[in-house]
Amino acid sequence: MIALPAGSFALVTGASAGIGEAIARGLARRKVPQLLVARSEEKLVALAAELRSLSGVAVEAIVLDLASEGSAERLFAATEGAGKPVGLLVNNAGFGFYGPDEEQELDRKLRMLKLNVGTLVELTHRLLAPMRARGGGYVLNVASTAAFLPVPYMAVYAATKAFVLSYSQALHEELSGRGVVVTALCPGTTRTDFHRVAGLAPGAKNPFPSLSAETVAEAGLRGLERGKAIVVPNLFDSAWIFTGRFVPRTLPPRIGAAVFSRLKRAKPI
Ligand SMILES: NC(=O)c1ccc[n+]([C@@H]2O[C@H](COP(=O)([O-])OP(=O)(O)OC[C@H]3O[C@@H](n4cnc5c(N)ncnc54)[C@H](OP(=O)(O)O)[C@@H]3O)[C@@H](O)[C@H]2O)c1
C-alpha cells in the first residue's frame, strides 16, 4: 500500500496521456491526492476533475512545459513552496525519436535530454530533501526496456533511459533503509501516443509484443508498493533482457539496428 503522510500529494509528470494518465488513474483508485503535470491544459484539467470526483480526494492540474528552462524550480515553487508537500514523485514525462541519429534535429535532442534526464534529476534532487526530512516517501521513475542496451535509430532516447535506470537503481540502494523507495519502471512497447510523437508512421507495425498503458502503470505501482528496484512489466522483455546477459555486448545492438532501421517513419511531433 502507498501510505503518504496526511496532507501530502503524489506528483505525476506527463499525466495528460498514456502511461502517466494510467498511473494517475491507478493512484486515484488508491485514493491518493495528486498534482498532475503536463502541457495540454484542457486534457489535464478535465482529467483532474474526473479523478477528483472518482476518488473523493484532491487532484489538481499544473500546466507546465518540463523541457523549458527553470521548469523544475517553478514546479517546486508550485508544490512544496505552495504548501503542497510531495510524498510520491512520478517522473514519467518523456519522449523519443525513431530514425537515423543525423536526421534528428539538435534542438530536439537537447529538449529530450532536458526532459528525460535533466528535469528528472532536478525534480528528484529538489523533492527528495523535504521527503527525507518528513521521514520518507516514494520515487517512481519511468525508464524503458531501451535502458538495457544501446538502440541504433533511437540512440539518444535509449541513452537517456539508460541514465534513468542507472540513476534510479543507485538511488534505490542509497536510500534503502532510509524510508524512501525508488523504483525504475521499464516498459517495453506500450500502446500510447509515444510512437506517433517519436515519428513511427501511422499503421506501421512495431514488431514487439505490446501492453496497454493500464497494465504497465499497475505493474509500476505494485512494484513501488513492494519496494522493488526495477519493474519490467512484460515477460517477453524480461526474457530477452535476461538472455542478453549471456551474449557478446556487440550482438544486441546489431539485432536492434536490423529491426529499427526497417520501421516505417513519419514526421515526429
Ligand atoms: N509507449 C512506450 O512504448 C514506452 C516504452 C517505454 C518507455 N516509455 C516511457 O513512458 C513515458 C510516458 O510515455 P507514454 O508512452 O505514455 O507517451 P505519451 O502517450 O506520448 O505521453 C507522454 C506524456 O508526457 C507529457 N509530456 C511530453 N512532453 C512534455 C513536456 N515538455 N512537459 C510536460 N509534459 C510533457 C505529455 O503531455 P503533454 O503533451 O500534454 O505535455 C504526456 O502526458 C515516457 O518517459 C516514455 O519514454 C514509453
Image: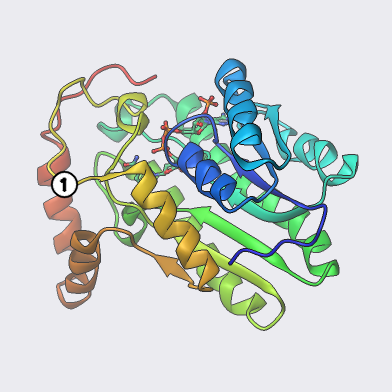
Residue for point 70% across, 46% down: 33
Q: Amino acid at mark 1?
A: Phe
Q: Position of residue 225 (x, y in %)?
A: 54, 68
Q: Position of residue 221 (x, y in %)?
A: 49, 58
Residue for point 43% across, 68% down: 230
**On the rendered structure, is 124 left or right of 208?**
right
Q: Position of residue 186 (x, y in %)?
A: 38, 57
**On the rendered structure, is 161 left or right of 59?**
left
Q: Is residue 106 above or below residue 132?
A: above
Q: Nearer the viewer, residue 28 or 64?
A: 28
Number of marks: 1
Q: Is residue 169 above or below residue 252?
A: below
Q: Residues within 10 Å of mark 1 (few under 14, many from 20)?
A: few
Residue 155's image quarter? top left
Q: Quadrant of the N terminus?
A: bottom right
Q: Nearer the viewer, residue 176 or 174?
A: 176
Colour style of the rendered protein structure: rainbow
Q: Quadrant of the C terminus?
A: top left
Q: Is residue 211 above or below residue 59?
A: below
Residue for point 38% across, 45% down: 214
**On the rendered structure, is 97 left or right of 130?**
left
Residue at label 1?
208
Residue 78's image quarter? top right
Q: Is residue 255 above or below residue 53?
A: below
Q: Nearer the viewer, residue 17 or 73?
A: 17
Residue 117 shows in this picture = no
